[in-house]
Image (spheres, rainbow, N blue to C red):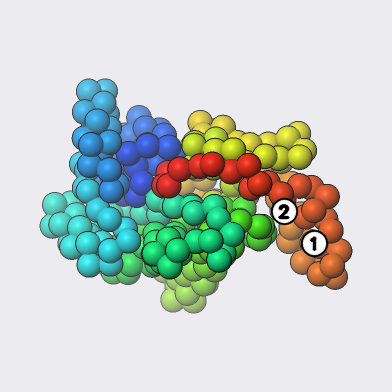
Amino acid sequence: MTDVRDKKVLITGAASGIGKLLADRLGAQGAELILWDINEQGLTAVKEEFEGRGMRTAVYTCDLNDRQAIADTAARVLEDHDHIDVLVNNAGVVTGKDLEAASDEQILLTFNVNTLAPVWLTRAFLPGMKKRNSGHIVTIASAAGIVGTARLVDYCASKFGAVGFNEALRLELHRNELDIKTTVVCPFYISTGMFEGVKTRFPLILPILKPDYVADLIARAIRGNRPRVVTPRFVMIAYLGRLLPVWLFDRLMDFFGVSKSMDEFTGRSGH
């Protein structure tokens, strides 16, 4: 187990949702929190709340859709804090539209925030981790990075990219004999509001997840250096499903209601 006490933990998308809940848990365990979000007002409120409870908290407003903004903000963080021990790439956005109904700008935003921002952030803080030969990079992906579904074509593609990024990075770090940990988290739909309106056909095996449960799971995974978290465990069946003929795999997705899970989606943008 890894003690996060006095570790410098950077979490993106931390003004609300899973990001805030995870920050709350790690801060309560003694971590020094470095929180990013595009929502300046939300960050200010979180900082006041956390500091009022004795947590060390620094906040940085950053638009993860802007690569230069990421670079500039990362440089400020390194100037202020010297290094990062744990990087949690949590921020995400979802359009929730059929592919042709999404605008070019919405699709670019999805990939910039969900796929490329973790790459730019890792490139910014990895050199320091390599220098110390320690660190932990956490990628909050999605079950949609394992199984595709309708009305999530751009989102699924972006999360498949995030899952692939984590896997290749893990192997590269191992190949270079570096003691830097990675964790990828692939949850089913979470009731944060981001996926408001989604449905599940079999809630006993594919439940809409509670945010507190997922935050607890991620916190334990960080402390335990778990390389992969897939929840609920039933989602793991998708890996076996890849061995089936495509037509049969698609039938299974229909049977379990995955293909229609977004039919009543209303949602909101971001975590």
**Residue at point 73% right, 35% down?**
203
Residue 32 visible in image: no
Pointer 2: what residue? Answer: 259
Cβ–Cβ below 8 Å for labels 2 and 1?
yes
Seen as rendered, the residue at the extreme left is 79
Where residue 161 appears, as percent x and y from the top left, is 52, 67
Pointer 1: what residue? Answer: 250
**Residue at point 49% right, 54% down?**
95
Please state which amino acid type lies under the numbered disc 2.
Ser
Q: Residues within 10 Å of mark 1 (few under 14, many from 20)?
A: some
Where residue 193 appears, as percent x and y from the top left, is 49, 37
Relative placement, left or right, of 109 versus 61 is right
> In the rendered image, which quarter is residue 252 located in?
bottom right
Q: Residues within 10 Å of mark 2 (few under 14, many from 20)?
A: some
Mark 1: secondary structure: helix
Where residue 242 appears, as percent x and y from the top left, is 77, 66
In terms of sequence position, does the residue under pointer 2 or pointer 1 come before the other? 1
Seen as rendered, the residue at the extreme top is 53
**Residue at point 77% right, 38% down?**
202
Mark 2: secondary structure: helix
- 263 or 252: nearer the eye? 263
Where residue 141 appears, as percent x and y from the top left, is 52, 55
Residue 106 visible in image: yes
Relative placement, left or right, of 198 versus 184 is right
Please state which amino acid type lies under the numbered disc 1.
Asp
- 7 or 21: nearer the eye? 21
> In the rendered image, which quarter is residue 74 located in?
bottom left
